[in-house]
């Protein structure tokens, strides 16, 4: 999104007071388990689960839509490696990544944070077991879809190397999902749907066509693309539904609130006082030794490394994105909708 001078000044002001900026700069102590030039991993001292680790960017960005493309690709490209290392350190069967954009979504610091929880079956954590209710009205489905496709087309126009073809092939493990739910977007790697039964109207699910269950098996590029679509879906909810916050929640592998062990990124629109308040955990001091856990995790992080990406060759644009993108005549309304989305997002970080 466009950063206005006003927004830049506001972020600079936030940065001076920001606890996480001070932890990554080592001005105040933190239990750092991983570090490279872009990201830092810090063991949470008030964990929701044993091994709860926060991965963040060294630079100060309040929410996901404000993260520049290269840092976005770096961070989200490392998600499979972070997950693998955490699961291995904690001998876990699954992992969650929880992201809150905005106070209404449970964000308490204005610095982007990715909360990773190692997960197990029988771990008694049911926070992300969504009570499924109503789905979104058809007219609103169309609004959200238009926003999402407009954002993606605009991005591909500026970044042709990131283009994805619109292959309609659906792997067998996603066929029932594609049949039951309106498809918002798909390409050869991603299926993005609005499920019939959802946690809240506007709940979007983003699936990888490359991997059924385990985020750790996705490639760096596969993971970046999965979260790239999820992030655009979240942006589409701000303006499309007037959401005051969004959550992006990865479920991967088996846990009490993911009994089938499926890999899926859930994108949720949030409003103050909505039915999703129970997702958040209460900060509490653990009874075990945090330094022991930090040492275990650090031990598995030694070979986590971002591989610099060669620019992909531009794929000939003979395939249409599925479903079809808005036509040329709608170009003006698309750029208007981009501006509207920027305005809606700016409201939540003030
Ligand atoms: Zn900060």
Image (tube, grey):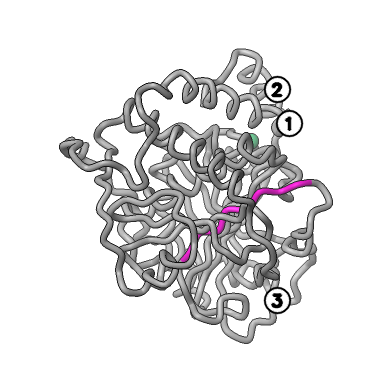
Residue 211 shown left or right of residue 257 in the figure: left
Indicate which disc residue 17 carries.
Answer: 1
What residue is rendered at 41% in x and 36% in y?
Answer: 152
> As rendered, which of 12 and 4 lies closer to the eye?
4
User: Which of pointers 3 and 2 lies earlier in the amino acid sequence?
Assistant: 2
Label at residue 288: 3
Residue 170 is marked as none
Q: Contact (CB < 8 A) between labels 3 and 1? A: no
Q: Please name whichever residue, 4 or 270, is drawn nearer the observer in this view of the structure.
A: 270
Q: Which residue is mark 2?
A: 13
| Residue 42 appears in view | no
Q: Quadrant of residue 111?
A: top right
In the image, what residue occupies the spot 38% across and 54% down? 223
Q: Quadrant of residue 291?
A: bottom right
In the image, residue 90 above or below residue 32:
below
215 versus 162 height, above or below: below
Give the residues in magenta.
264-271
């Amino acid at each position: 999104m466009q950063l206005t001078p006003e927004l830049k000044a506001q972020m600079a002001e936030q940065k001076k007071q920001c606890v996480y900026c001070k932890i990554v700069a080592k001005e105040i102590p933190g239990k750092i388990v991983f570090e490279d030039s872009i990201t830092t991993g810090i063991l949470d001292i008030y964990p929701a689960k044993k091994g709860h680790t926060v991965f963040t960017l060294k630079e100060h960005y309040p929410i996901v839509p404000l993260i520049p493309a290269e840092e976005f690709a770096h961070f989200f490209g490392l998600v499979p490696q972070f997950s693998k290392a955490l699961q291995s350190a904690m001998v876990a069967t699954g992992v969650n990544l929880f992201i809150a954009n905005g106070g209404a979504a449970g964000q308490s610091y204005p610095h982007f944070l990715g909360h990773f929880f190692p997960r197990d079956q029988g771990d008694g954590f049911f926070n992300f077991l969504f009570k499924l209710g109503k789905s979104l009205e058809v007219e609103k489905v169309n609004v959200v879809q238009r926003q999402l496709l407009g954002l993606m087309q605009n991005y591909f126009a500026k970044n042709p190397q990131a283009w994805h073809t619109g292959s309609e092939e659906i792997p067998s493990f996603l066929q029932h999902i594609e049949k039951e739910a309106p498809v918002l977007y798909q390409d050869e790697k991603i299926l993005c749907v609005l499920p019939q039964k959802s946690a809240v109207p506007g709940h979007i699910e983003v699936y990888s066509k490359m991997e059924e269950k385990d985020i750790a098996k996705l490639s760096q590029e596969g993971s970046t693309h999965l979260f790239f679509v999820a992030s655009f879906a979240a942006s589409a909810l701000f303006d499309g539904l007037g959401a005051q916050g969004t959550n992006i929640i990865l479920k991967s592998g088996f846990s009490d609130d993911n009994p089938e062990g499926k890999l899926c990124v859930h994108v949720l629109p949030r409003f103050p006082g909505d039915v999703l308040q129970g997702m958040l955990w209460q900060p509490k001091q653990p009874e075990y030794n945090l330094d022991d856990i930090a040492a275990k995790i650090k031990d598995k992080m030694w070979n986590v490394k971002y591989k610099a990406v060669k620019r992909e060759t531009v794929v000939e644009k003979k395939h249409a994105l599925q479903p079809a993108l808005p036509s040329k005549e709608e170009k003006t309304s698309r750029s208007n909708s981009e501006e509207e989305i920027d305005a809606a997002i700016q409201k939540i970080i003030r």
